[in-house]
Amino acid sequence: MQVRAFVAVSLCGLALYLALKDSSARGAVIPLPSTATDGSGNLLPGGSFDPHYRAVIGPGVNAVGPAVVYSASNIWSQWVPDDPHSGWIGFRDNSDSSPHGDYTYELLVNLTGYDPATASISGSWAADQFGSINLNGAATGVSLPDGNWNSANAPNLNPFSISSGFHSGLNTLDFVVNEPDGFDGLRVSSMTLTATPVPEPSTCCLLIGGAAIAGLARARSGRAKH
């Protein structure tokens, strides 16, 4: 009786662990911040610092700092217009300013607790004048030609997806924008991360251990009655 009770309850614990593991295997979908938004996903006013993206490389820019949200008056008339949950950013709130060249807008993506081999990111974006995306310093093959920012060509922005190149912990997602003249910037919207959570070893130990204790308790209870 003792052995049967112990085994039965232990199997229940194992079944619960496997059920939790199967649930995790379906993956989690995590929203990532759009450009020009606050922590709640609402559009920030022009001239604000973007709390999520920072300009990390640019000719003539001496200090690395947060990207700046464009004011409505500084947005190029042909750009896909801002909406309540995403907007255009630049290295300063003056789209007709210089110096010109390549600027990188960096977003950190934390994969702690997730399997990087299962991770993927999808969203939509526009970059004036040209754009490309790097992940952890490596090219992803995602790029945009001139005119991608024109609302007449891509009124809903340009879709993209990345499904390789991730690693555990913090990942660096870089949007590289070539700005050869005035009125240049970046817009990223509706971006999500999909990844499979990694079950913690302690979860299995707690479930099986708890089942073992319960089995012993049941066995002792049965023995006491006889």
Image: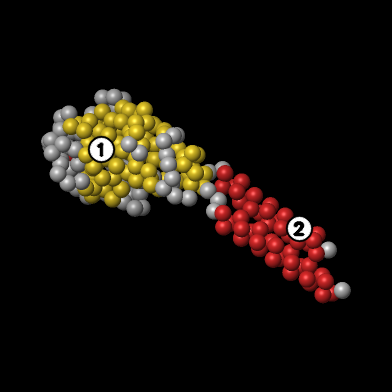
Q: Is residue 51 above or below residue 160?
A: below
Q: Mark 1: which amino acid?
A: Thr
Question: Toward the viewer: 94 or 111?
Answer: 111
Which picture quadrant has residue 133? top left
Q: Is residue 95 left or right of residue 145?
A: left
Q: Quadrant of the N terminus?
A: bottom right
The image's mark for residue 7 is: 2
**Which image quarter is the C terminus in?**
bottom right
Query: Which of pointers 2 and 1 lies earlier in the amino acid sequence?
Result: 2
Q: Residue at x 45, y 38 (%)?
A: 120
* Percent coordinates x, y for residue 96 in the rendering: 14, 35
- Residue displayed at 39% across by 40% down: 191
- Tell me if residue 69 can be seen: no
Q: Amino acid at mark 2?
A: Val
Residue of label 1: 104
- Residue closest to the eye, 31 or 56: 56
x and y percent of residue 181 in the render? 15, 30
User: Horizontal and vertical percent for residue 172?
Assistant: 34, 42
Distance between the Cα atoms at labels 2 and 1?
58 Å
Q: Is residue 147 left or right of residue 199?
A: left
Seen at 82% across and 75% down, the residue is 224
Residue visible at 37% across and 35% down in the picture? 124
Tag in front: 2 or 1: 2
Element under disc 2: helix
Indicate the position of residue 207 as horizontal and vertical percent values. 64, 59
